[in-house]
Image (spheres, rainbow, N blue to C red):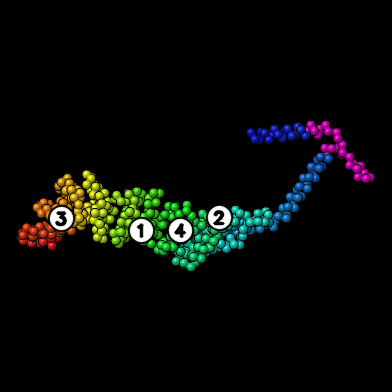
Amino acid sequence: MRAALWFMALFGIAVAVALFAGNNQAVVTVFWPPHRVDISFNLMVLLLAGLFLLLYLASRALSAVFSLPVEARRWRAQLKERAMYGALMDALAHLMAGRYIRASKSAQNALAQEKSLGVTTDPAGHPSGHSASLASQLRSLAHLLVAESAQALQNKPLRNQHLQLALQNSSARHAQEVREGVQFRAARWALEDHDARAALDWLGQLPQGASRRTLALRMKLRAARYGQQTLSALETARLLAKHRAFSPVAAQSIVRGLALELLSDAHDPAQLQQAWEALDDTERAMPELCVHAASRMMSLHGDAALAREWLLPAWDQMMEPRSELGDKLRIKLISVLEAGMDSLDAEWLARIEAAQRSRPRDVNLQYLAGMACLSRQLWGKARQLLEQAAPALQDRLLHRNAWRALAVLAEQREDGASAVEAYKRAAQV
């Protein structure tokens, strides 16, 4: 279709020229004293068109001749630019292949080529903004490759030198992404050196948007754990779980482990209570955290009533028909309740008795109910429950405590033989 339109246009032009020039009888007279030259108007038009074409071709030829030095410089610059990018690609390939010395040399060669190349200028002679941006990014990446190779070779002075050069070249506004990448790499190198403080410093220099990326949060989590900043690590793990950086099971496991570590770091009841309040509602409902926090409170000689209050979510989960609490966690919960039997209130006593009645074959609950009756001086009921539970208990500590309690009850009723037998059974556990 386009060709047909072109042919129609050419035919139209030909018809117009034929109509104009075919019947044109005009004459142009040129006076050049003492001569007179008469030529037709059509020939005059052709001569003027030929003269214009000749002058145009002459100007183009002169422009091409005078532009030869510029084209030669441009050609040489293109060769240097190709060599520069080739050296940069070689450095990246050597780095990925584990040839760190060759990678460093190739990156330094790229820097030398870029330095000899200079910055491209616009027709007015001013540095081109796009060219300056590319040159700055290339220098930063080349310095970063040299620093990465030096880090792999444990050459820290060379690494720090090129790291600073990379940061200087990426300080412009158009190189913000490169600067963030350099800071991420510096934080990773600090983590590889197990320098948590330096890693956190590098991460703290990131902009607000970059500091909330998944990569930054992962690094912050590792750095906080290296630096034993458990609360900061826990907060970072919550953000990672919110961003779905881990699977739900892995996220719960990481958060639970950090929360357990936070509770274990408390050295007095006040610190323990502060750590407990730092947990959110979901974490405070985890049975592992409930039992561990209550156990720490009892080991620190804190408020037993507060410890039992923390135990309530774990107790409720244990009493569910299809509870998934493990045997170790159940035994630990019972041990925590046993440790605070002296201050056991009527509400908890009724709760324990109801649990034992609802599960009469649970020897652990029988043991707990027996120890609760013993603390309330209900000798007969305590003896009955402990005699049923003692032979079937699997945990060594509970087994030993049950026989010792039976020995105390035997001494209470002045049954020496039974007391000796119970002490003997406790010693054999």
Q: CA distance from mark 2 to mark 4?
A: 19 Å
Instruction: Tell me the residue that label 2 is attached to.
Output: 173
Q: Quadrant of residue 231?
A: bottom left
* Residue 236 locus on image (x, y percent): 39, 54
**Which residue sits at x=37%, y=60%?**
229
Q: Which residue is mark 4?
A: 204
Q: First in sequence, mark 3 or 4: give its number.
A: 4
Q: Does residue 247 appear in this view?
A: yes
Give the class, few, some or many, for how many residues have Cα within 10 Å of label 4's Cα (few <14, many ≥20).
Answer: some
Quadrant (top left/top right/bottom left/bottom right) for the C terminus: bottom left
Of 33 and 43, the residue lying toward us: 33
Q: Which residue is mark 1?
A: 230
Per the rendered image, the range of residues in magenta is 18-43
Q: Is residue 124 above or below residue 154?
A: above
**Element carrying mark 1:** helix
User: Are discs 2 and 1 less than 8 Å apart at CB?
Assistant: no
Residues packed near mark 2 inside 10 Å, few (<14), some (14 to 19) or many (20 plus): few
> Residue 342: x, y in percent?
18, 56
The residues tagged by marks 3 and 1 sit, at their Cα atoms, a distance apart of 39 Å
**CB contact under 8 Å: marks 2 and 3:** no
Distance CA(mark 4)–CA(mark 1):
18 Å
Q: Which mark is residue 375?
A: 3
Residue 346 within the segment the image draws in magenta:
no
Q: Measure the C-alpha gap from mark 2 to mark 3.
A: 73 Å
Q: Residue at x 61, y 60 (%)?
A: 117
Compare residues 395 and 48 and report the one nearer the observer. 395
